[in-house]
Amino acid sequence: MGKDKGEYSFSTCWNIKRHPVGSGMIEEIRELGFRFVELNYNVTDELLETIEPLIERGEIGVSSVHNTFPHVPDPDYGTDSVLLGFEDAERRNKAIELLVRSAEYAHRYGARAVVVHPGEVPFVHNVDQELKGLYHEHGADSAVYRSRWNEMLERRESLSAEYLRRIGDSLEEACNRIASKGWNVSLGIETRSRCYQMPTLREARSVFDRLPDAPVGLWYDFGHGMMMERMGLYDNAADMELIKDRVVGIHIHETVGLSDHWCPYVHSGDMEYFDRFLPIIAAAPVKVYELKAACKPEEIETSHDLLLGKLAGLGT
């Protein structure tokens, strides 16, 4: 049994593929010492049949759910989609309805937030996969990478304002519907892992400026932030100042190269880079580890101990 993790939560993405029965998945996470879970977007109605009794009996708390929740098999409304930015009104309205449904589940389970992938600037082919291949083969400073990156960035920047406007419209509509129900649930738009996906930290700030009083904030995924910094999309240390007042939740993991969902400090062996996120971790209302299945219980324990030690040293 792992040591008690207190307020820290743990995403079911770690072990969902190992468990055909939801209660078994939750029990394995409890054995790590976590009192809270984030129910991710692959959790199905069938898995919930055995998870909900655990929630009702108070055997596990739910910190957050990840839109779209429960699982929606239609890729148009999956995690890698235009979603809240759809130009087509019917598809965008359905995306809003699904987000409100996720908020309803969050409210029902006593969760504080919904993690939201708001949208992306669409490309004909997977330019992110192409760029990551060039990154690995030639490096981020190579002429071939920089040339292709600049082409991607030109298209992204030429179209992003319109998609961001529709995302803002959708979030405003969703917040109005949630408020009308009286649900105390925040929507956290998540930093993403592909270069054409939204938002960057600066794009997120523009959404918050438009919706200053809405329960919308940033879901800061540190591993994705590291990945996008390495690829060249933004600078975490500089840009986090813009959004630190609107962080509603975090995904704690780190990126080794361009591979994400590893245990902070343990898998990279880097004892310094991740420190830039410590003030955000300390202040975040909802703190969730989002780790891949390859992370072992003892590595998770070691990583958490290192993180707590680092946090204890803040301001000393």
Image: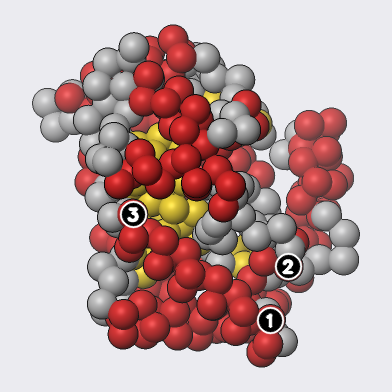
| Mark 2 vs 1, N-terminal side | 2
> Quick one: which residue is furthest to the bottom in this view?
89
| Mark 1 vs 3, N-terminal side | 1
Residue 91: which disc? 1
Element class at badge 1: helix
Residue 95: horizontal and vertical position, in percent?
60, 75
Q: Which amino acid, by three-letter code, is at mark 1?
A: Arg
Q: Residues within 10 Å of mark 1 (few under 14, many from 20)?
A: some
Q: Closer to the observer: label 1 or label 3?
A: 3
Q: Does 257 sit above or below residue 51?
A: above
Say which residue label 3 marks.
109
Cα separation between marks 1 and 3: 27 Å
Which quadrant does the C terminus fall into? top left
Q: Residues within 10 Å of mark 3 (few under 14, many from 20)?
A: some
Which quadrant does the N terminus fall into? top left
The answer to the question of whether label 2 and label 1 lie on touching residues, with beta carbons closer than 8 A, is yes
Is 243 left or right of 236, judged from the image as shown? left
Residue 56: horizontal and vertical position, in percent?
30, 46
Closer-to-camera residue (35/286) = 35
Cα separation between marks 2 and 1: 8 Å
Residue 86: horizontal and vertical position, in percent?
67, 79
Cα separation between marks 2 and 3: 26 Å
Element class at badge 3: helix
Residue 2: which disc? none
Say which residue label 2 marks.
76
Q: Does 126 sit above or below residue 24?
A: below
| Residue at 61% over, 20% down | 294
Residue 225: horizontal and vertical position, in percent?
52, 45
